[in-house]
Image (spheres, rainbow, N blue to C red):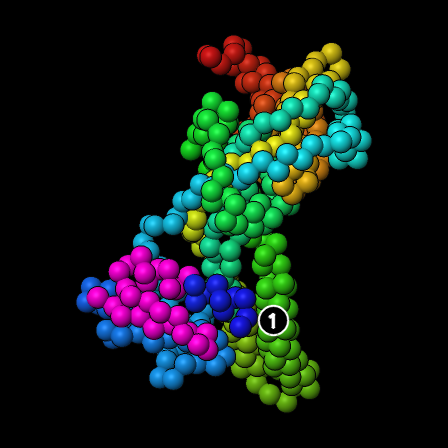
Amino acid sequence: MAESTIHFRDFAAEVLEQAGALVERIEPEGLEALLPAELNSQLRTGELLRAGFGADLPPEAQRISLESDWLERFGHLLHQRGRRMRVALADPFVSLSNPEKLLEHSLALPNAVYRFNGITGAWTRYLVLLFRYTALSDEKREGIVKVGVNLNQGSAIDGFADELMMQAMTPEAMSAVTPAAKDLPADWPTARVKSYVNRALPSLIHDHLHLFLQGMQRRLDRDLVRIFDYYESLRQESLSKLKKQKVDSARETLRIEAAAREYQAKVVDLKQKYDLSVTVELSQVLEIVSPVQRINLLIKRRKGERKLALDWNPLVRRLEPLPCEWGYTKEAARIVCDDALHLVSLAGHASCPDCGKEHCRACHPRQCPRCRQAAALKQTDQSGQSEPK
């Protein structure tokens, strides 16, 4: 029996049992359930449900698959149950033997230096948010994207979120003891979570839709060429007749103008046909409490310095990337700003498109400070006095 089939059958059996049904697993790859009246009404089936999940069905069984509407039926049955889950992982008591060497090969700080200040055992909380997206154009695509972050220092964990989730689903994780609240990072404010997600989702969804977007662009280009060739042939035909002066010139001129208008209208229709809309819905929130080896660093930039803690996860044996205090990024390199020693991605310290000067987007998220100062000086020169503060 395929592993995915087993998982789907077990999932269906557990949902039905929790809803009050009497369930028995049968072969090949099926189940039989006796449903109470209320559950029968919700699932829109008979009192006795006999279902199959694999290629071969039990006698008189209906097929339940991922492509059928049964996932939606189970979703209505679950409603909000299972939307949020918290799991604690057991400490494997694995230590990092050479943290300095790991840091040397992992950290990228082009304009700053760091000093290793020791390593200690600790606990952290990972927040993994699963979003379901639907992309609709001339075709439809659906999928799931994950946004994962360490609530201690804000590092993105997308590189090993799947491995952590696999660890969280093991029986050992279900029985692990959760540490005291004082040993764990605090919850992020809702506004901070939303800001992080809003920066992460567009990039993650674009990566998921990369091939779909390429195919859509090829189809659009093909249709644009086809329409252009058709109306260009009409225009050339009329121009040829006008050149030979064998037809009414006014009528052919009107035909050329009409063809141009029709061509523009067809282009607009094509753009509407291939217009892409993407809807995103939060599907599930998973909080994973995990042991970590916490590496303490001292970051130095010119005369300034700041302390930073970076976590190495012993369960997946991975060092988390440096956090970006401006938002989500896939880049490993971080720039340390001069004003507040923020750690930001290269894009978070890029040049201003107006004045060309670099500035930290964590310090000044809305406007370049140099452009703002220039605008204030210009206002002062024009009015003879500065604007009221």
- Label 1 element class: helix
Q: Which residues are magenta?
A: 11-36
| Magenta residue check for 29 | yes
The answer to whether 128 is drawn above or below residue 269 in the figure is above
Residue sitting at the far top: 385
The residue tagged 1 is 219
Percent from the top left, x then y, of residue 99? 75, 29
Residue in the picture at 65% in, 43% down:
316
Residue in the picture at 53% in, 82% down:
251
In this picture, residue 42 sits left or right of residue 289: left
Which of the pair 154/353 is nearer the observer? 154
Tell me the quarter of the picture where residue 115 sits: top right
- Res 205 seen here: yes
Which of the pair 22/383 is nearer the observer? 22
Percent from the top left, x then y, of residue 24? 35, 69
Residue in the picture at 39% in, 70% down:
25
Percent from the top left, x then y, of residue 109? 75, 29
Tell me the quarter of the picture where residue 326 sits: top right
The answer to whether 263 is drawn above or below residue 95 in the figure is below
Residue sitting at the far bottom: 246
Which of the pair 363/13 is nearer the observer? 13
| Magenta residue check for 296 | no
